Amino acid sequence: MPELPEVETVRRGLLPVMEGRVIACATVNRPDLRFALPEGMAARLTGARVERLRRRSKYILADLSTEETLLIHLGMSGRMLISGVTLGAFHHDHPAPAKHDHVILDMEGGARVTFNDARRFGAMDLMPTAEAEAHWLLRGIGPEPLGNAFDEAYLVERLKGRKMPVKAALLDQKIVAGLGNIYVCEVLHRAGIDPRRAAGRLSSARVRSLVPIIRAVLLEAIEAGGSSLRDYRQADGELGYFQHTFRVYDREDEGCAREGCGGTVARIVQSGRSTFFCPRCQR
Ligand SMILES: [Zn+2]
């Protein structure tokens, strides 16, 4: 499942072919993804210029010249593919539409952006740009972990008195936007914090230490071009999924990556999801 760094990587990959460019023709091949697609979607997109391509949490938002914003969520398996342009390593003719190509944006200038999603857990919607933050998928989401509103004082305040495990607190999108299972495991390992600890029982010094670590882990992953558990093929013009190595995630029974620790990575289940951590150096 794409997390914030993967979505940011997709956004950055789409920037040169979408931002500032007109959608010459939009094709919508089905009425719904995870939810119903907006009415008249193809007509509302066709002819619109993408003024700005931004990200909020795990959502890509394209602000259009029509004063509407296109929301894109990749869900579990959604993929954005670029074809028909030369962009660094990418150079592909438009492939024949494949089975799960649900939305196709032919951009002025020749690039084609295809949203392909075999499982259809992804979502797209259109809303007035002025009301984008109030969209039901976006409202209530906490501050961006890479933004100014997310700082040490904020996190200390939000975790104060919370009985939930610190892992669950960091996964709570109301506390901080966009963190998922993989990167929370990585953050807690780097911080040396046991994921089972009650959030509100951590010293404020330890909570404060999480903020720069969260930023560093995300920035490193963005730098690496995102990551994925699956075998994605960058050479096919697909964006956002690159090889990335983790220190604890999916490394059960392997040696701890922390120098001098000598511990072994363990896997436990918290709230139905796997947590990977080192019982020796995460306290
Ligand atoms: Zn360790």
Image (cartoon, helix red, strand yellow):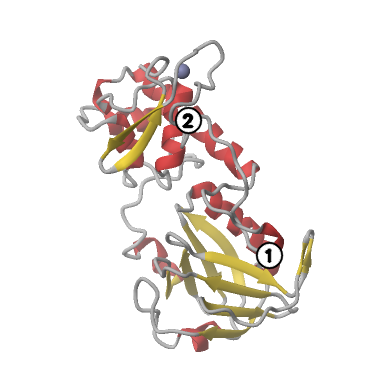
Q: Is residue 117 shown above or below 141? A: below
Q: Position of residue 137 (x, y in %)?
A: 34, 62
Per the image, label 1 sits on a secondary structure element best described as: loop
Q: Is mark 2 within 8 Å of ligand 1?
A: no
Position of residue 267 relative to residue 84, above or below, is above
Mark closest to the chain's N terminus, 1 or 2: 1
Q: Position of residue 124 (x, y in %)?
A: 44, 71
For the residue pair 38 and 245, the one nearer the viewer reads as 245
Vertical arrangement, residue 93 with respect to residue 40, above or below: above
Residues at circles 1 and 2 in contact by the CB criterion of under 8 Å = no
Image-quadrant location for residue 73: bottom left
Q: Which mark is residue 248?
A: 2
Distance (Cα) linking label 1 and label 2: 30 Å
Q: Residue at x 62, y 68 (%)?
A: 81
Residue at 60 percent across and 72 percent down: it is: 50
> In the image, what residue type sits under mark 2?
Val
User: Residue 10: which quarter of the image?
Assistant: bottom right
Q: How many marks?
A: 2
Kind of residue at badge 1? Gly
Badge 1, how many Cα within 10 Å: few under 14, some, many 20+? many
Whether residue 61 sits left or right of residue 199 in the image: it is: right
Q: Which mark is residue 237?
A: 1
In the structure shown, which secondary structural element does the residue marked by tag 2 occupy? Answer: loop
